[in-house]
Image: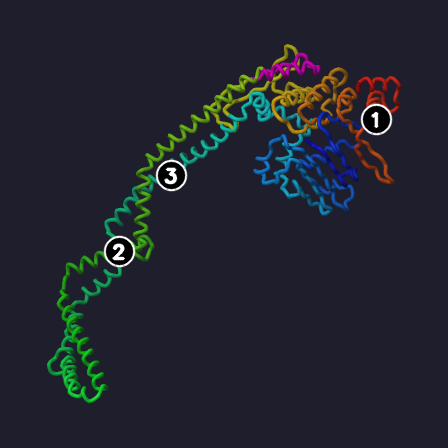
Amino acid sequence: MLTALSIKNYALIDHLQVNFNQGLTIITGETGAGKSILLGGLSLILGKRADLSALKNVETKCVIEATFNISNYKLESLFKKLDFDYDSQTIIRREILPSGKSRAFVNDSPVNLSGLQVLGAELIDIHSQHETMQLIDDAYQFQVIDALAKTSSELQKYKAAFKAFKTLQKEYDDLLKFQSEAIKEHDYNSYLLKELEDAKLIEGELEELEETYETLNNVEDIKEQLAQVNNVLSDEQIGVMTALLTAKNSLQKITKFSSKYNDVYNRITSSSIEVNDIFTEIETLQDQLDLDPEQLLLVSNKLELLNMLLKKHLVTDVSELIAIKTNLAEKVSVTEKLDDTIAEKQNEVAIAKKEIDDFAETIHKKRLAAIPSLTKELEAILQQLGMPNAKFNITLNTTETYQFNGKDNLSFLFSANKGGAFNELKKAASGGELSRIMLAIKSILSNYVQLPSIMFDEIDSGVSGEISNKMGEIMRSMSQSMQVFTITHIPQIAAKGNTHFKVYKEDVGEVTQTNLRLLNHDERIVEIAQMLGGVEISTSAMAHAKQLLN
């Protein structure tokens, strides 16, 4: 409930500070006194966009602040979703700066307007002629029926299941699309994969094959050069091995004279051993060299194949070809197993569909059961409000279309006159009738769900006498379970309030200001008497006012 409202530097308001209580709060005042300014300030608290024209003094900022007791509203999850700081005594503040910029705060933390609008809708409902048009909206009509049908739990489950169903359905559709495209590529991918598999790729083999090819392709030249080296090393007259042996023998004879000679001798000995090893290695290499045209052809063909594959796949190394082969194998495998995957996903979709169908059926049955009660209550209240022949024809049909709140189509038809044909609300009901229907619906809803504080902005426009008295009774009854404000010009309704505020204008110096004052009992008598008979209060008007209040 709204417990306090502070307005500074807004329109004709210089500074207004007022506290509110539970129950039915009446707001009265002459036409043009500034009731719309009060509503405008509240609208800013609920997230309406602001502009510089709202400032009374354009050189200082406008500040509007409202305090709400939300301990019974169960809004913790909404605050968490909006990333707002929760407090059972929530304070919302709007500031309009002289620059024209606007800022919003919830519990002293800055918030964006979209989030504030979501929260504001849960805190206070300003009901004007415009809001009455909600009645013709299917979504609102469903909200009314669902409140009476107590489908909240089933709707939450349906929405969660519907979300999961849409996800699965998309995955299934994506698989079908992928299959359609994959089939086109499957044969080509299979061909590429077989080509790579037949190549029997081995990481690092390209360098090895190139070396083998160079060797086999130059056997004669290699043989000739190895033979020449062999001769240089082993010739009996001038060979390196013979020379090293001679040098070794000569040095051996003088090693006993000095360690220096011994060191040189050891080095010659090591060199001789190394040269002997080289000679042995060369002989081995010579033995391994054979002109093998067949092997050369095989190596040449394999090199040609590898180079062709590298060029074809725009890579430079066999390891990259192996990676491509692995990727192709996965694609081919996925395509070949796609039928099974699609069948599994189709089964998941069917199970999810069955689940939301079950929830939708439960919701449908509960709605059907609630419609007679809603119709009866609406017609009974409207009869009290001067519409004795008002009738509703509310029907509900199941469709095959999944909607955000089930599978139902709702027809909410109305007839205002006896024997009249049923038609849509927007065609069958006048503005005044729509206002009374909305009051009846709000009254019914207040018995089933926790509604936000509601402010009726001259909902009684166009009615008088006993009907206005009944409207006041309905609003007072609603205020037993919620906070109700009503802006009214009708004394019978004004007398029903628990508290009564008067909006008035006054001239302060050379400036006109709007203010709001809580009336005591005697002031209420005077205000209601003026509403009954005008500024010149008669004795009978005073007596009538006292009678209404008592």
For the residue pair 382 and 136, the one nearer the viewer reads as 382
The amino acid type of the residue labelled 3 equals Phe
Q: Return the residue at label 2.
A: 306
Give the quarter of the image for residue 208: bottom left
Residues packed near mark 2 inside 10 Å, few (<14), some (14 to 19) or many (20 plus): many
Q: Return the residue at label 1.
A: 523
- Looking at marks 2 and 1 on the same chain, the residue that comes earlier in the sequence is marked by 2
Q: Residue at x 73, y 41 (%)?
A: 63
Disc 3 from disc 1: Cα separation? 78 Å
Mark in front: 2 vs 1: 1
The amino acid type of the residue labelled 1 equals Glu
**43 versus 526 height, above or below:** below
**457 magenta-colored:** no
**386 magenta-colored:** yes
Q: Circle 2 sits in a helix, a strand or a loop, which is it?
A: helix
Magenta-highlighted residues: 373-394
**23 versus 229 height, above or below:** above
Decide if residue 4 is on the left or right side of residue 324: right
**Residue 18, horizontal then vertical, whole percent:** 76, 34
- Looking at marks 3 and 1 on the same chain, the residue that comes earlier in the sequence is marked by 3
In the orientation shown, which residue stands out farthest toward the top?
419
Disc 2 from disc 3: Cα separation? 32 Å
Q: Residue at x 15, y 87 (%)?
A: 253
